[in-house]
Image (tube, rainbow, N blue to C red):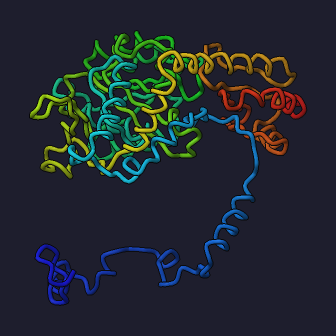
Amino acid sequence: MTGSPYAPHTDAETAAMLDAVGVDSEADLFDVPESVRFDGEFGIDARSEREARAEVRDLLGRNDDLTEFMGRGHYDHYVPSPVDHLSLRSEFLTSYTQYQPEVAQGFLQALFEYQSMLVELTGLAVANCSMYDAATALGEAATLSQRVRSISGDRILVPELLAEGRRGVLDNYTAGIDVTVETYPMADGTVDADALADAMADDVAMVYAESPTVRGTIEERLGEVGALADEHEALFCLGSDPVALALLEEPASVGADVVVGDAASLGLGTAYGMGLGMFACREEFLRQVPGRLVGAAEDETGRRTYTLTLQTREQHIRKERATSNICTNQAWVALRAAIHAATLGPDGLVSLAEDCVTLPRDLAARLDDISGITAPVHDRHHFREFCARTDRPASAVAAALRDAGFAVHVVSEHLLGIAVTETTADETDEFVAAVREVAQ
């Protein structure tokens, strides 16, 4: 870079900058612990391609081969083969950000269809073309509540039953904007509307609820939550996912102002932490939407075209006007979600959602017949997952199930979280038999 007209990197220039900030070397600018500091050696012996493949295959072969009845935000749905075949095309896979619409019409159209899918499922007018995951989408909704001129509160209310990681990201987002995050009680796995009403006041900026919840329960009083938020001029943010929204009531109809969640249930299968944040909101918040929006336009000949019509992150506009410092998005993952949804079609998406209700219902009923197990714990309809109470310590039951080849979540001392989708439906007989063996 020496001699670059844009980046000063000569020895003299570097020395002048170091002197200006009062340090002797570039290394003094970083506080990297000695234990993790790079010493110049990777410690990896050189190998041929064949040797490297053999070693990786041996390493991966040490993983436990378990059938996972796990959920809590990450779900395994069968991904149709067209998703891989189309999304792995080079024009999609190698594309980063579609700044130049003249060379990215196909990708931009796919993202536009993804946005359109979310608009149809939520009933809200605006959806962005993806975010990192559900947790960051929730954090962005909280910061949006502080930018909306009609909202003046500084408290965010969230359910006491909320995924730990999601709450942690929300706390990080709100730490720098003088917003307080508080919890409201749940009653049998869903919103305690009376307790929420007591917690509401005019200093509440946003109320967050989920359906399905982290325990798989379907929220029955969303209309009341929306009415409470509206009464106190607070935003109502609803967390869900596109498969659930294919069957559940439309968020806009219950007063939701913002809908967030993880759309990775389409296009990714079990993603083990990889997410696809969805974010939709009312049209009046258009200028406050984080990230980017793909819009439809016309070229000079009148043909329909697509372009990035709104880019509100600080890389694109003046920092003081940016709505978010989010640096990228999940465009390729959103593409996969759009392909998956299009492959299923409306009827297929509804059919998948119906399976997500009947499969856990039937599995819970079978487990409830086992001595030492009560399922489901909550007297509610469930989506994909439910909690089961165990007479034995839940950790002991989970460990015994692991030895039998099955993985479940330990929720608390006597609660197991169990999720089932179409990909594990054929394993339920063996799973029930294993639970029967270890429950007492």
Residue at point 72%, 55% (across, down): 63
- Total labels drawn: 0
Query: Image quarter for residue 29?
Result: bottom left
Q: Report which quarter residue 312 is drawn in.
A: top left
Q: Position of residue 91 (x, y in %)?
A: 36, 49
Q: Position of residue 386 (x, y in %)?
A: 65, 24
Q: Which residue, as the protein is rendered here, is positioned at the far front? A: 301
Q: Residue at x 35, y 74 (%)?
A: 30
Residue 117 in the image: above or below residue 270:
above
Q: Position of 332 compared to 151: left or right? A: right
Residue in front for this viewpoint, 184 or 46: 46
Whether residue 262 can be seen here: no
The relative height of residue 127 versus residue 143 in the rendered view (above or below) is above
Q: Outermost residue, bottom direction?
A: 12
Residue visible at 54% across and 17% down?
218
Q: In the displayed structure, does residue 145 sit left or right of residue 224?
A: left
Q: Is residue 329 above or below residue 32?
A: above
Q: Position of residue 392 (x, y in %)?
A: 82, 33
Is any atom of residue 57 visible in this view? yes
Query: In the rendered view of the protein, which quadrant contains the N terminus?
Result: bottom left
| Residue at image location 68% in from the left, 20% down from the top | 359
Q: Quadrant of the C terminus?
A: top right
